[in-house]
Amino acid sequence: MNVVVYPGTFDPITKGHMNLVERAAGMFDKIILAVADSPKKKPLFNLEQRVLLAQQSLAHIDCVEVLGFDCLLAEFVKKHQANIILRGLRAVSDFEYEFQLADMNRKLAPDVESIFMTPTNDLSFISSTLIREIAMLGGNIDEFVSSDVASALKSRYLQQSNA
Ligand code: COA
């Protein structure tokens, strides 16, 4: 049985991430979307909110489980008896960091393979940072995120502007 862990900060999950999960769902028995605590990134949404938004956005896919984690990725993968780490590669600029991450994870968990998927062309320019920025400035993000994420971003920035 191939259990894949797809890790990231998902602050918030975008249609780029969702597209990867939808396509991977046809290839593996189970996908665990692993939402990293990532305190250094000072996420807009806390871990619990990011997990909930990912669960809502992926509710239409049966073989996906969304879990938060605040330990080493290699430990998380072993604990959940997964054998593959999945990452998305959007552009050449992603490559150097991903190469380093994959090498380090191979050192820490030699039995686990890292694999990469590219997004479909119409989604390759999306990043969570850009989505947050567009939402903060009142732009339309409906095309790039699920309706649950769009509502959460709109109410978050409405709260901030009223504060
Ligand atoms: N579509 C659209 N955007 C995508 C994407 C896709 N398919 N895949 C990644 N991105 C974007 C994200 O939105 C994010 O954009 P942002 O930086 O503008 O917010 C960016 O690419 C990269 O973020 P993400 O995929 O969330 O990765 P990350 O660098 O935040 O996460 C971890 C890296 C969580 C995997 C890594 O920090 C980790 O493993 N942490 C656990 C602790 C650990 O084990 N550390 C040692 C590692 S060897």
Image (spheres, rainbow, N blue to C red):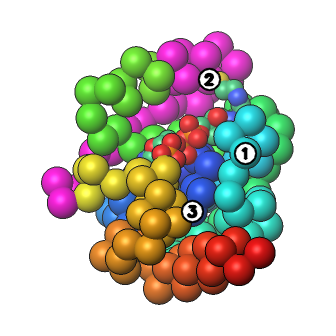
Residue at the spot 55% in from the left edge and 85% down from the top edge? 151
Q: Which residue is mark 1?
A: 42
Residue 27 visible, this orientation = no
Where is residue 20 shown, x and y percent of the image? Answer: 37, 58
Relative to 46, say whether 163 is above or below: below
Amino acid at pointer 3: Pro
| Secondary structure category for the residue under label 3 | loop
Local crowd size for mark 2, using a 10 Å CA cut-off: few (<14), some (14–19), many (≥20): many
Instruction: Please tell me in which quarter of the rendered image ligand 1 is found.
Output: top right
* Range covered by the magenta-colored residues: 100-122
Q: Is residue 113 left or right of residue 54?
A: left
Which residue is at a point 71% across and 80% down the rendered structure image? Answer: 162
Q: Is residue 115 magenta?
A: yes
Disc 1 versus disc 3: distance between alpha carbons?
Answer: 12 Å
Query: Which residue is labeled 2 in the image?
Result: 105
**Residue 126 in view in this figure:** yes
Taking 113 as reference, is 28 above or below it? below
Quarter location, residue 24: bottom left
Q: Residue at x 27, y 35 (%)?
A: 91
Ligand 1 closer than 8 Å to label 3 CB: no
Q: Is mark 2 within 8 Å of ligand 1?
A: yes
Q: Pointer 3: residues within 10 angstroms few (<14), some, or many (20+)?
A: many
Query: Please, what secondary structure does the residue beneath circle 2 have?
Result: helix
Choose the circle earlier in sequence order: 1 or 3.
3
- Label 3 sits on residue: 12
N-terminal label among 1 and 2: 1
Q: Is residue 109 magenta?
A: yes
